[in-house]
Image: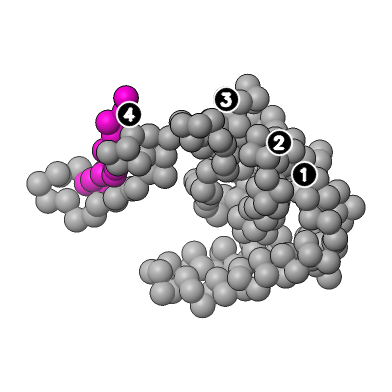
Amino acid sequence: MPQQRHPKALMRYSTDEANADYWLAVKRFDCMGEQGRLHLHSVAGLLDADFRTPSLDYETLIKLGSMLCQSPSVGQALFKRALFFNLFACNQDDHSKNWAFLQQDNGQLQASPAYDLTFSPTPYNEHSTAFMGYGKQPPLKVIQQLAAHANIDRWHKAKIMIDDILDTLANWSAVAPQLGVSSTTTRLIQQQLDKVREDNRTLWG
């Protein structure tokens, strides 16, 4: 019998509930309304990988996704997330609990939508999930090997993907004011994005 779940979780941001000005409505991707809920497996749970400390590598993650989901496209999607949201967009809080798979009633697994993505540089600029042993500035050879593990058969395909990622991130300073981000915060984030781009020039230069 399907579990009964509320399709949306509501949280009120105010110390005075009677006069709350802001609400956050979150539609969970594992909740299917009256149909119940999909089972979610985090990589932390699947591999018993401690999310509080660096305990995962993208090589393992990509191989795991491809094997569990039996789909080359899953490895490619995980590779793109690793570079887009995490390496170049500076989300270094990419620990094992922030990767997951959803399971259908028939047992079929699929990669969950990306979640808990945020600009999150760490004090030492090291990622929680390593790029084949590198916590930052992975060499070109390493990313080429990751692309191969992700079922990307030619490097130029991965290079096109990286170029698209950088083109998208280049719009940050134009988009941020439209989202209400202050000029100070926009500038600080842009400086960090520029630094990460330059630090990883070997991947796109």
* Residue at far left of view: 18
Residue 153 pos. (x, y %)? 84, 56
Tell me, for residue 2, which label it has, or none: 4
**Front residue (pair 193, 163):** 163
State how far apart marks 3 and 2 are (Cα).
16 Å
- Look at discs 1 and 2 and give the one toward the viewer: 2
Question: In the image, what residue type sits under mark 3?
Answer: Gly
Dot 4 falls on a residue whose secondary structure is loop
Residue 123 pos. (x, y %)? 64, 44
Magenta residues (range)? 1-14
Tell me, for residue 45, which label it has, or none: 3
Tell me, for residue 171, which label it has, or none: none
- Residue position for label 1: 131
Question: In the image, what residue type sits under mark 4?
Answer: Pro
> CB atoms at circles 3 and 4 under 8 Å apart?
no
State how far apart marks 1 and 3 are (Cα).
20 Å
> In the visual, does 4 lie left or right of 166?
left
- Residue position for label 2: 67
Q: Few, some or many C-alpha atoms within 10 Å of disc 2 (few <14, some 14-19, many ≥20)?
A: some
Among the two numbered marks 3 and 2 on one chain, the one whose residue lies closer to the N terminus: 3
State how far apart marks 3 and 4 are (Cα).
23 Å
**Front residue (pair 110, 180):** 110
